[in-house]
Image: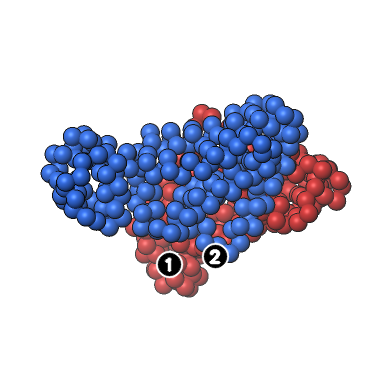
Chain colours: A blue, B red
Amino acid sequence: MPSAAAEPLTPERILETTEEVLRRFGPTKATVVDVARALGVSHGSVYRHFPSKAALREAVTDRWLAKSVVRLEEIASAPAEPAPSKLEAWLEALFEAKRHKAGDDPELFATYTVLLAESSGVVDHHLSELIGQLTRIIAQGVADGTLAAQDVPAAARAVFDATGRFHDPQYAADWLSPTITAEFEAVTSLIVRGLRA
Amino acid sequence: MPSAAAEPLTPERILETTEEVLRRFGPTKATVVDVARALGVSHGSVYRHFPSKAALREAVTDRWLAKSVVRLEEIASAPAEPAPSKLEAWLEALFEAKRHKAGDDPELFATYTVLLAESSGVVDHHLSELIGQLTRIIAQGVADGTLAAQDVPAAARAVFDATGRFHDPQYAADWLSPTITAEFEAVTSLIVRGLRA
């Protein structure tokens, strides 16, 4: 990490550095002073952007979760794709995103699991966003006659709940199992079949 | 608890007492000496039936899980019931059993959650038994043409995985939510619809 005190201290730079500090020290040890030191600034300068350690952590968690939603939003918004295959692609992309985070960067994933337990407002927002995307996909299918659901938001919530084993961080250890892909496919095809018109 | 050293020291008496001791002291503090003291016998007498503390704990967990399976086995084996409603009734009974254990006796449930994490062989056996019951229900439906599944054991596993939010002890805190019953019903009807022929 360059000390780079000459660059302007933007919220984005602070959040990037906080992510690196969390990766290095873990969520229990990392402090605002560590973040300020890595940036070559005073901790007062960090507090000017984020008024507390909790606010900084929430912002980091929010940013991390937002990045994972971008690809899912693209799938949910694709105009030409039929709803049933869109639903499958979305569930697969969600599982892939969570698995990658858990597998490629286990220290940071563990860090975020702790943060997730702390910042429930941020997580609730993330879950609502995901269920909102599912709602749009199912509504599209109901509108064009490929899917059937009496209560679309309830159906979206049911799809999200029924696939929890493949996106809830509590199950991260199971994602290394050699049979997990087959299990994911079995659940997905059961659910998509359950929604078909 | 009566001291009742005169009664014969059966494995069943030891296990009943162990359950009470676990309820009183919790899984980290309860010892074989506590169990022996509650029974009014030497700890050697307990070890004659259960060679180690681990063996005793596994036997208690196994007994506790076996009790919850009895009602589910009755549903799975009911001769006249059509498979789709049998499947619904079975999933509801599983959720009810887990909820009751969590709600009526929270200390013991917390105790068992710890034991479950320790005694994976016992838990694996319990899960296989449950998935085996689901397999029989689905096979019955496939045989009489009410359900459709290409790979019956895989479909049973998918049903179990898709309903994890309503039986996995990790989610016990969610079972107190005022919306949990509606969420359970939405997932169950999605799954049963996904399996209908």
- Decide: is A153 above or below A9: above
Chain hosting mark 2: B
Which quarter shows the N terminus of chain A? Answer: bottom left
Q: Residue at x 18, y 34 (%)?
A: A48
Q: Earlier in the sequence, mark 1 or mark 2?
A: 1
Q: Total marks drawn?
A: 2
- Decide: is A99 above or below A161: below
- State the image quarter where residue A195 is shown: top right
Residue B184, given in percent of the width and then of the height, sits at: 60, 36
Q: Residue at x 70, y 46 (%)?
A: A190
Q: Residue at x 72, y 57 (%)?
A: B153
Whole-number angstrom distance, CA of label 1 to CA of label 2: 16 Å
Chain hosting mark 1: B
Q: Which residue is mark 2?
A: B121
Q: Which residue is mark 1?
A: B53
Residue A148 appears anywhere in the view: no
Q: Residue at x 52, y 61 (%)?
A: A176
Query: Would you say the residues marked 1 and 2 are in contact, meaning their CB atoms lie under 8 Å apart?
Result: no
* Left or right, B26 with reference to B68: left
Report helix, strand or loop for mark 1. Answer: helix
Residue reaching furthest front? A6
